Image: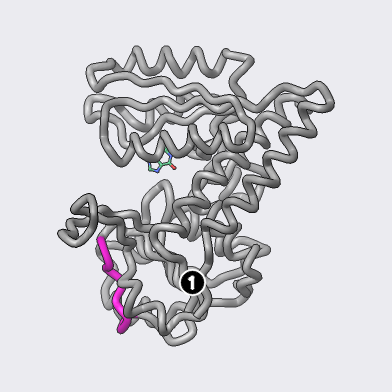
Amino acid sequence: MQLLDGKFLSETIKKEIAQQVQSIQQKGGKTPHLAAVLIGDNPASKAYVSSKVKSCAQVGFHSTLILKNTTISQNELLEIIDDLNQNDDIDGFIVQLPLPKHIDEQAVIMAIDPRKDVDGFHPMNVGRMAQGLPAFLPATPFGVLEMLKRYNVMTAGKQAVVVGRSNIVGTPLSILLSRKGWDCTVTLAHSRTQNLIEVCQTADILVAAIGIPRFIKAEMVKTGAVVIDVGINRIEDATAPKGTRLVGDVDFERVAPKCSFITPVPGGVGLMTVVSLLTNTLQAAKQRVLG
Ligand code: GUN
C-alpha cells in the first residue's frame, strides 16, 4: 500500500506556482490576486477560507477576504459579486458555500463572471468541462486528478466508482474520470443506489465523497484498489487534545491494508483542493493578460 501524500504534493505544486509568480513579476507582470467571500461563521467554512488565504501568501499571490454576517441580503451579496467582477485588480474569486438559507446559491453562482470563476461552479465552466473544452475545473476534482497523475496511477479502462453526487465533487469528478485522457468506466453511486456494497466492490478506483465519517468499510473495497477519500469530518474523540479529530469517509485503518494506493485524512485530498484553487487563479491571471 502506498500513500497518496497530499502534503508532499501540495508543497511541491506550491513551489512551482511560487516560481511562476516570481517570473511574472520579473517580467513586470501583475501579481495574481484571489478574493474570497465568506458569509457567517460556520467553523468549517472559516477554516477552509483561512487556509486558502494563507496559501495565497505562501505562493506570493495577493488575497482579499470579504467577511459578512448572515444578515446580508441576497442583493447585497450580488452587489459584492458585481464589484468583484468589475474590479480589474481581482483575477479570480470564490464565494464560500454553503450560504445562509435565505440566499439562492444558484443565483449567486450565476452572477460570477465565468472568467473569474476559479471554483469552476458557473454553468459555463461546468458545461465546458463536460464537453472537454478548456475550463476552470472545480478544485477538489482537479486536485484528485492531479494526485492520480503525479503518482502515475493507471486510469485508462479502469472501473471507477464515485460515491456521492454533489455538484462540487462527485458529479464533476465522475464526468472528468470518464473523459479522454482519463478513460475510466465510471459509476456514480449515491444515497439511492441499490447494492452499494457490491457496486463498490467492482471499483479499481473508489472515490468516497459522501460526507459520512468512515462510511467505506474494508468489505466494500476490492484488494488492490485505489481509494480516494474526499471526506473531511470532525468527530468527537476524548483522547484527542481538542476533544475532536478529523476523519475521512473511509475507515482508513481497516481499508488501507487492502489498497494499492490510498489518500490519508488529513494530509490527502483537502490540501490538493487548496492548491488547485491557486492553479486556477494563476491561470485566470495569465488569461486576463493574454486575453
Ligand atoms: N464549500 C465546500 N467546498 C467548497 C469549494 O471548493 N468552494 C467553495 N466556494 N465553497 C465550498
Main secondary-structure element of the magenta-colored stretch: loop
Tell whether 51 sits left or right of 287.
left
- Relative depth, front residue between 164 and 266: 266
**What is the quadrant of residue 61 in the picture?**
top right
Residue at (36% x, 27% y) in the render: 38
Task: Report how many numbered discs are placed on residues in the image.
Answer: 1
Question: Image quadrant of residue 239?
Answer: bottom left
* Up/down of 208 relative to 172, above or below: below
Residue denoted by label 1:
160
Q: Dot 1 surroundings within 10 Å: few (below 14), some, or many (20 or more)?
A: many
**Range of magenta residues:** 213-220
- What is the x, y in percent for residue 194? 26, 73
Ligand 1 position by quadrant? top left
Q: Does the residue labelled 1 lie within 8 Å of ligand 1?
A: no
Rendered residue at 56%/34% (across/down)? 56
* Magenta stretch: includes residue 277: no
In the displayed structure image, the side of residue 262 where residue 130 appears, left or right: right
Residue 219 part of the magenta-drawn span: yes
Q: Is mark 1 on a helix, strand or loop?
A: strand
Residue 190 locus on image (x, y percent): 31, 63
Position above or below: 262 against 50: below
| Amino acid type, label 1 | Ala
Find residue 110 and report its image quarter. top left
Instruction: Give above or below for 130 relative to 136.
Output: below
Is residue 97 something that shows in the picture? yes
- Residue 159 shows in the view: no
Out of 27 and 114, give the one closest to the viewer: 27
Q: What's the coloring here?
A: one colour
